[in-house]
Image (cartoon, rainbow, N blue to C red):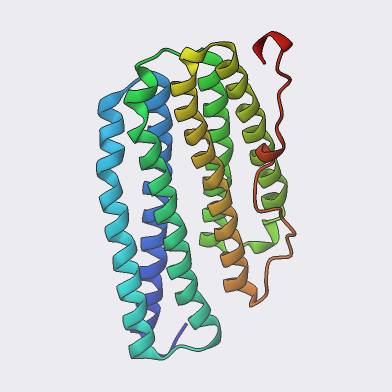
Amino acid sequence: MHIVRAFDEDLKYLSGRIAAMGGLAERMVEQSVAALVHHDAPMAQKVIADDRLLDEAQRDIDEKAIAVIARRQPLADDLREIIGAIRISADLERVGDLGKNNAKRVVAITASRQPVQLFRGLQALSDLALTQLKDVLDVYASRAVDTLGFVRDRDDQIDAMYTSLFRELLTYMMEDPRNITPCTHLLFCAKNIERIGDHATNIAETVYYIATAEQLPIDRPKGDKSHRVTLDVPEAAK
């Protein structure tokens, strides 16, 4: 507890705003994927509109954090806390952008019905990425950084699932040229979701630094393996 009680209130305000941003970002991603799966254009429009709220929240956190630094001149733990809030809010704003971008593709994708298993794959990828994000935000709230061991393994799982979905979508595109446009949109959606997992891992690294003043000891590959995907093309198709 600080001598200046108002300083504690400032830090509490920042952490509360981060929690609210996290909840909104999670909901936007969930609803964007639900809109894709259920061909729900009104829900997609709601996600697009909600992005403005997330942008405003990030600006509020930035302005509050800068004001606190100027007024309190924090050091050590307190400075890491404030800078960490700025970094986490930036990652959450990007998560919201990725959800919004997926929502914008709903009309183009639903115009041509695609196999239900493709949407199941997208849903499964989203569930995994959102679990990563929710768990990391829970650690931010609790500061139980000793539990962050799950981050590396789940990040690898997200990348592997994305690469598998990437391969499946390419196969559908090769089988029928009519699938190219909707499957291309789905590829972009899948990549957006994979990037959400990366932002969750960025947040984990920031939380660990806030709590320990050290870098999170995770040697994670920052990228998927879809660049290695190759498909055998039948001779007749060459």
Along the viewing direction, whichever of 121 and 107 lies nearer the viewer: 107
Query: Is any atom of residue 174 visible in this view?
Result: yes
- Give the vertical position of 71 relative to 231 (above or below): below
- Give the vertical position of 169 relative to 213 (above or below): above
Side (left or right) of 191 relative to 101: right
Along the viewing direction, whichever of 225 and 100 lies nearer the viewer: 225
Query: Where residue 182 sits in the image (x, y, percent)?
Result: 44, 22
Query: Where residue 125 sits in the image (x, y, percent)?
Result: 57, 33
Query: Where residue 116 sits in the image (x, y, percent)?
Result: 51, 14
> Which residue occupies 35% across, 20% down?
39
> Which residue occupies 57% across, 16% down?
172
Q: Quadrant of residue 117?
A: top right
Side (left or right) of 238 relative to 88: right
Query: Where residue 112 sits in the image (x, y, percent)?
Result: 39, 14
- Give the vertical position of 189 relative to 144 (above or below): above
> Which residue occupies 27% across, 52% down?
53
> Which residue occupies 57% across, 49% down?
135
Side (left or right) of 191 relative to 38: right
- Quadrant housing the C terminus: top right
Query: Is any atom of residue 28 visible in this view?
Result: no
Side (left or right) of 57 relative to 168: left
Along the viewing direction, whichever of 134 and 2 lies nearer the viewer: 134
Along the viewing direction, whichever of 118 and 58 lies nearer the viewer: 118
Among all residues in the image, which is located at the extreme top? 236
Q: How many marks?
A: 0
